[in-house]
Amino acid sequence: MGSETMGSFTAGSDSTFTPHPPPDRRRGNPALRRWLPALAVPAVIAAGALAGTIPASAGDPLPARTPAEVLALAASHQVESFSGTVEQSSDLGLPALPSTGPGADPASAGGAASVVGFLSGTHTARVYVDGKTRARIQVFDRLAERDIIRNGNDAWFYSSKDNSAAHLALPEHASDLPLSAPAQGQDPSAPGLPGDPPTTAVKTPEELARQLLAKVDPTTAVTTGADVQVAGRTAYNLLIKPRSDATLVGQAAIAVDGRTGMPLSVQVTARGAASPAFRVGFTSLDLAAPDGSLFTFSPPPGSTVKELAVPADGQAHHGQGFQPPTVSGTGWDTVVGLPAAAAGGGAAAALLNDPLLAQAVVVVPGGRLLSTALVNVLVTDDGRVFTGMVPPDRLQAAASAAP
Amino acid sequence: MPSSVPAEVPGAPAVPDLALPRRSGLSLMVSELRVLFGRRRTWALLLALAAIPILIAVAVRLSSSVPAGRGPAFLDRITQNGLFVAFTAMLVSVPLFLPLTVGVVAGDTIAGEANMGTLRYLLVAPAGRVRLLLVKYAAALTFCIAAPLTVAAAGAAAGAALFPVGPVTLLSGDVIQPGEAGLRMLLIAAYLAVSLAGLSAIGLFLSTLTVVPVGAMAATVVVSVVSQVADQLPQLEWLHPWLFSHYWLGFGDMLRQPVLWDAFGRNALLQTGYIAVFGALAYARFTTRDVLS
């Protein structure tokens, strides 16, 4: 460039104007120096990104505790009011679902599909809890949101996608129960663990940790790992390892906040896998009581409002012809079988018929199988449903053994 | 007058002061903005952006009501509340129309002057190449602020003209008054302005590479489309957080109660990174090249 320049203006002829050579000539080629920022900036960004991936060193090391003491700490924590952001990500080995563009959100397709949505990818929710009876969960979708608001005996569900609201008046005796959604979006094969009572599709680390800790028994080895940092807090890392070889679960790690004992994150790793198949944890946490106005909800104008029936008791939705599920195996190897007539079985069978999940379902001898890294679901040809955190052949064995 | 301006050499008065007074950065900025917004093309771009909400409002007005959950988000709310025209229009214009107009303005910055043969006069002024680059980028940023504001204002006006205006239902189900809704609209416009800052920096750099402004404009628009396509491919998931278009549709967080600032912060950080990288590239390219036209 610049070969056809007039002599007195070329870069090399500046000594015509300056009797002394410019001082910065000593520092090398000026053109090269001007490209330096263009090289340095990406290097700085790369260094910053790398530094961000290094886990922050624990500020104040926590006092050493035995696993039993950490268990007791988690069981006795007193945190009842907090607000925070929860992130859940699943890598269960299901095929990638169609991208959730603004118009093609699986959440819009209704019950089964929204559960399928939670089985893959990453989801973010904001959780506000004030005491035992006031809570709000906001599940974020792109340009949409699903809210669950509980204030005393009133529970509201709101979906911005179709501007619909549902109300449920909880019975008096339910006032101290933990928040659960006995309505839309529930399914026995939600990403929780089989056999647990149905709850909302997004679980807080607290709920999931409670369910995992309930499984701690002689079939489980409990140890503690190095302290971890979760949501800017130092936490004990409780490692739960099934002693049984028959389960798909390799290890569950629960981060227990060192100061309060509150479970901050849960990661479940499949046997033989390097990274967790399912994780849920706080990315930010504030232990102050949230603003009370967050818990008052009235359906917005123009929304469709549905009044939900109150279940008379916990099992009411199974109806008159309720048959108890068959349970075989113990501890982590438990296989739960639902008879064909049970409401839950029908829902699970419907789930396998969902067009999104259908591609993940394989036909096996005796039925159809939905196989994930942590949970397998077998729907037999006669409509019974068997589920458990065990390999498929165990489900088939349970199915043939069951009456 | 010289027929070309060679690359600047620091410390050396490479170009003698040709009796033109050295203009301050501010007056250069003012004159640059006057040129940008005095141009018929700039007004045509803004008018085209304003036409989007008007088109949406008229189409919804003339057609039967939109069933809930169909079409772009917020479209079904318009008949109940005209302010949603602004939200729908901003959503619709994010993937193509806003990047298109910003690409035209940012791609024209340096290449346009070079194409018209005015660049060397700007440089012999002598305003200094760094200052010229900064002023050009600032002008492009001003357009990034003006463009979403135009969509929002035209949307609110068209919606108010054709539909009733009332309290706005947020994504969280909470209801806010129209005044606060206007504030949220400004927040979204600010979010979009920040979102487009990185693309402007890319356009500025591309504009220093060529003397054909159309080439720089087209390249900028293509880059924005490629980035959005890459953002949709699950195979490139590791790349997604690094794409400048990754948070473009995250402005829905401004419509939650309370406002969720995470995406805003991450977006701002990402765009700052793009500004730094492509600003440095533009600086390197523009200060080392010989200006021939």
Image: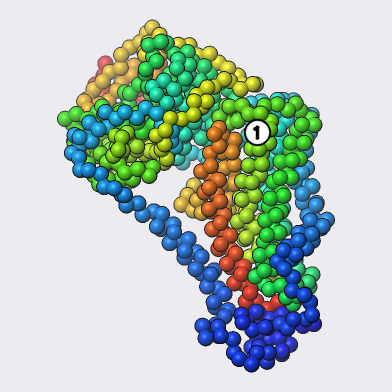
Residue at (73, 28) in percent of width and height = B165
The x and y percentages for residue B125 are 75, 75
Pointer 1: residues within 10 angstroms few (<14), some, or many (20+)? few
Out of A343 and A149, give the one closest to the viewer: A149
Q: Can residue A390 be seen in this view?
A: no
The x and y percentages for residue B40 are 83, 56
Q: In which quarter of the image is the N terminus of chain B?
A: bottom right
Q: Mark 1 points at which residue?
A: B180
Where residue B88 sits, quadrant-wise, is top right
From the viewer's perspective, tell me whether residue A169 is left or right of residue B223.
left
Q: In which quarter of the image is the C terminus of chain B?
A: bottom right
The secondary structure type at the circle numbered 1 is helix
**Chain that bears disc 1:** B
Out of A399 and B10, give the one closest to the viewer: B10
The x and y percentages for residue A356 are 48, 33
Where residue B214 sits, quadrant-wise, is bottom right
Residue at (58, 79) in percent of width and height = A31
The x and y percentages for residue B20 are 79, 77
Q: Residue furthest left?
A: A218
Is A377 drawn above or below residue B236 in the view shown?
A: above
User: Which amino acid does the dot numbered 1 rest on?
Assistant: Glu
Is B227 drawn above or below residue B291 in the view shown?
A: above
From the viewer's perspective, tell me whether residue B58 is left or right of residue A389.
right
Residue at (34, 30) in percent of width and height = A79
Where residue B187 sits, quadrant-wise, is top right
